Image (cartoon, helix red, strand yellow):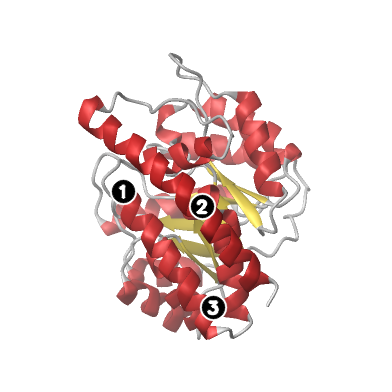
Amino acid sequence: MFKRGKEKPAVVIGGVNVAAITPRRANEVEVDLGAMLDLIDFLSAQPVQGITLFGTTGEFVHFTLEERSRYVALLSKRSRVPVMANVSHSTLDGAVMMAEESASAGVAAVLLMPPHYYHYPPEAVEAFCLDFATQVSPWVPVYLYNIPLFADPIPITVVERLMATGMFAGIKDSSGEWDMMQALLALRASRPFTILAGNDRLFLRARRAGADGAVTGVGCAVPELMVALDCAIRGGNTAAAERLDARVQEFIDAILEFPTPVAIKAAVGARGIKAGPPATPLGAELSAKLDRFEAWFREWLPVVQRESTAAATA
């Protein structure tokens, strides 16, 4: 249960927040804790602004609420940067239960997407988010998580009404729709809240337009690239930002044919951090493509690391 009387963590969410993968043990539906700790150490050693656990990149749907809560508690203590926890669940009670555990563990914020799998109209999505925030927002900052690919969208009209309640700290928009990002930025002009880009395709454009940061899957595989890109954007180094963004687009193009987050896990593994096997068999053809992707990534990474270092120190 919540630790009553505990104030919200005074943490500003922004910049580069890495969407962490969740390493699995082979032949088990279980988190590989040792590998996960190594990953947290690796990411914390980078100049990122935060780590997000059990999001879409972290394959939260494969794990029970109890597992997610237990590992959020362990990993948030291990991390040297603020941690956000995705507490999304197909039920309100499940989401609230995990939010209670995450708040007690001291996370910086929680993410909430609409209930997934079954489809609900906007009115029901709004009611779900309001009920959740009523119970949770006094104890931990709540961020909406708009990801229409996997759950019902949160229309901008619903976002406006939810933000008007004062119970939501911001939104992670993973729609990949520039019109939605523009609408959020326009809404923020009259009511302050944090906007995080959740689609790396739009990172450069959104950050230039005024988004506060991102939750980035690319950043789990290549944190140096996303940190250098953010630094170039904030420093007004247009040429470097565009060069680095081109590298981001290259990486995204290379992983598009794989289910999320198969290729990101393969890239993490190629860096010497255990990522575990895919959650489901890929078949011979896709497995061969993944082998080719890993070979490409091993050649691509050193070049990008050098470019990122040069941009960050310019």
Label 1 secondary element: loop
Give amino acid for label 2.
Leu
In the image, what residue type sits under mark 3? Ala
User: Mark 2 near mark 1, Cβ–Cβ under 8 Å?
Assistant: no
Residue bearing mark 3: 240
**Front disc: 3 or 1:** 3
Q: In this view of the protein, which residue sits in the foreground, 273 or 123?
A: 273
Disc number for residue 187: none
Instruction: Determine the image quadrant of residue 187.
Output: bottom left
Residue 309 % position (x, y): 65, 65
Q: Is residue 42 left or right of residue 248?
A: right
Residue 104 visible in the current orientation: no
| Residue that numbered label 1 is attached to | 151
Choose between 250 and 116: the one closer to the eye.
250
Q: CA distance from mark 3 to mark 2?
A: 17 Å
Q: Position of residue 55 (x, y in %)?
A: 48, 44
Q: Is residue 53 above or below residue 226?
A: above
- Is label 3 in a helix, a strand or a loop? helix
Residue lying furthest left in this view?
A: 285
Residue labelled with disc 2: 301
Residue type at the position of mark 1: Ala
Q: Earlier in the sequence, mark 3 or mark 2?
A: 3
Cα gap from disc 2 to disc 1, whole angstroms: 33 Å
Number of residues whose C-alpha sits closer than 10 Å to that of mark 1, classed few (under 14), some (14–19) or many (20 or more): some
Foreground tag (3 vs 2): 2
When the figure is inspected, residue 198 is found, relative to residue 186, above or below; the finding is above
The disc, 2 or 1, on the residue closer to the chain's N-terminal end is: 1
